[in-house]
Amino acid sequence: MGHNKLVIGLPLVVMIGLFAFGYFSILQADEVPNEQLDERTDLYLTLNEEENHGTVGWDWETMPSDGLVGDDYIEVILYDDDGEVIKADVQQIELQLLQGADSIYTSEEYAESEDGILLSFPNASEDNLTYGNRGMIQFSYSTDDHPVTHGEVRYLHTWTEHGGIDNLSLSQDRISFSSTDPDYWVILRSAVMEGRE
């Protein structure tokens, strides 16, 4: 009879211990306010000269403690050897918001910005899905005579409702919103064309 108590008691103690560990791990999950999320966001741009193809990706390392609201924007700018902006013709573009390996939102809409191309996407949390915290943009382009040598990606994150942006630029000195000025930050990353490093 004493052996039955061990067979029943040991798994019960292990289950209670695992539950308590999981509960306290969730309570201590790493969260930061939206104002500090820029320090915890991975953003990259890769360019492939042979295929005239580019990829932008972003991933928040943590979720904001003050929630997900508003729209975010990404602008991609391409440059030549002299550092002059190249207006490329976008042949194909797709923005995907990801949860794990699954695509939960896609869009092929973009606008020509003052310096390049501009895309927007929602930030939201609904039905166990989070939109905006992780995503990827793949695009192909053609240019006239000037070869692309490097590029830049600008990522504007907002965390309050707003009516969109007025002008089509994410340059810090030109950002303007339609209605109220929301809280936001912008991060930049540059990339050299693969094979030119």
Image (cartoon, rainbow, N blue to C red):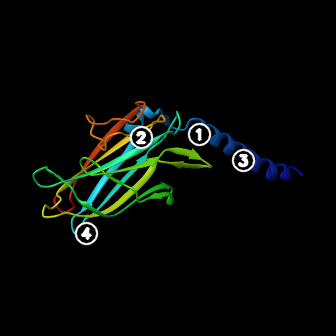
Of label 2 and label 3, which has the lower sequence position? 3
Which of these two is toward me, 25 or 11? 25
CA separation in Å, label 1 and label 2 = 37 Å
**Horizontal and vertical percent position of residue 10:** 76, 48
Of label 1 and label 2, which has the lower sequence position? 1
Tell me whether the residue at label 2 lies in contact with that at label 3, contact meaning CB atoms closer than 8 angstroms: no
Rendered image: mark on residue 51: 4
Q: At label 3, which amino acid type do we have?
A: Met
Location of mark 3 (residue) = 15
Q: Is residue 176 above or below residue 142?
A: above
111 relative to 82 in the view: left or right: right
Of label 3 and label 4, which has the lower sequence position? 3
Q: Is residue 177 above or below residue 145?
A: above
Of label 1 and label 4, which has the lower sequence position? 1
SS at mark 1?
A: helix
1 or 2: mark nearer the eye: 2
3 or 4: mark nearer the eye: 4
Q: Residue 20, located in which quarter of the rendered image?
A: top right
